[in-house]
Amino acid sequence: MRPTRVPVLLLALLIAGACGYVLTETAYSSIPPLPAFAPIGLLLLAIVEVGMSRIIRGKIRGTRPAGRPLHPMQVARAAVLAKASSLGGALVAGAYGGIFLWTFGRRDQLATYNDDARVSGLSALTALLLVGSALLLERACRTPDDPPRLTP
């Protein structure tokens, strides 16, 4: 499995942001208000992934020997979770970012615009935190490089 490339995540973020902006521009009146607790789920997932990355990195590098050793399949599942979370987080951050850009400029017109701007801005930020924690988890799942051999 190849490591996640940041340009791919940026492209996904930009495309989702454009889609979120266009969707908001064309159909804002038919979209229900954004849920106020949307950023909390993203934040909890980011915290879980940071915790997983600390545990996995310590077990792989041997600095955390307490407890049972990790099965290789657990590490592979964590790496897949990290890849999915990084791309999903980039898409969510882009979509909420597009909604934020549209509602932020109009927040003085209606209270709903102001509420949606706040929720979409916080959701975009927590989705970016999720992307960062997913990249950290993916990096933690890598095996350390072998030390260089000294040849006589």
Image (cartoon, helix red, strand yellow):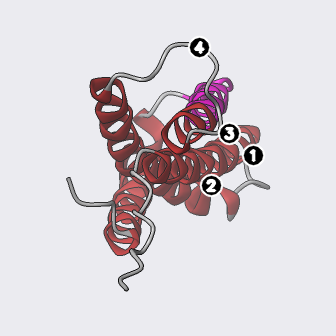
Q: Quadrant of residue 141?
A: top left
Q: Is residue 36 above or below residue 101?
A: above
Q: Nearer the viewer, residue 130 or 30?
A: 130
In what element is the residue under mark 3? helix
Cα–Cα span, label 4 and label 2: 49 Å
**Magenta-colored stretch includes residue 47:** yes
CB-based contact (under 8 Å), mark 2 and mark 1: yes
Q: Nearer the viewer, residue 112 or 87?
A: 87
Three-letter amino acid code at disc 2? Answer: Thr
Q: Residues within 10 Å of mark 3 (few under 14, many from 20)?
A: many
CB-based contact (under 8 Å), mark 1 and mark 4: no
Which image quarter is the C terminus in?
A: bottom left
Q: Which mark is residue 103?
A: 2
Three-letter amino acid code at disc 1? Answer: Asn
Q: Which mark is residue 119?
A: 3
- Closer to viewer: mark 2 or mark 3: 3
Residue position marked by numbered label 1 in the rendering: 114
In what element is the residue under mark 2? helix
Q: Which mark is residue 67?
A: 4
Tell me residue 58's x, y (percent).
60, 38
Q: Is residue 121 above or below residue 56?
A: below
Magenta range:
33-52
Q: Earlier in the sequence, mark 4 or mark 2?
A: 4
**Magenta-colored stretch includes residue 147:** no
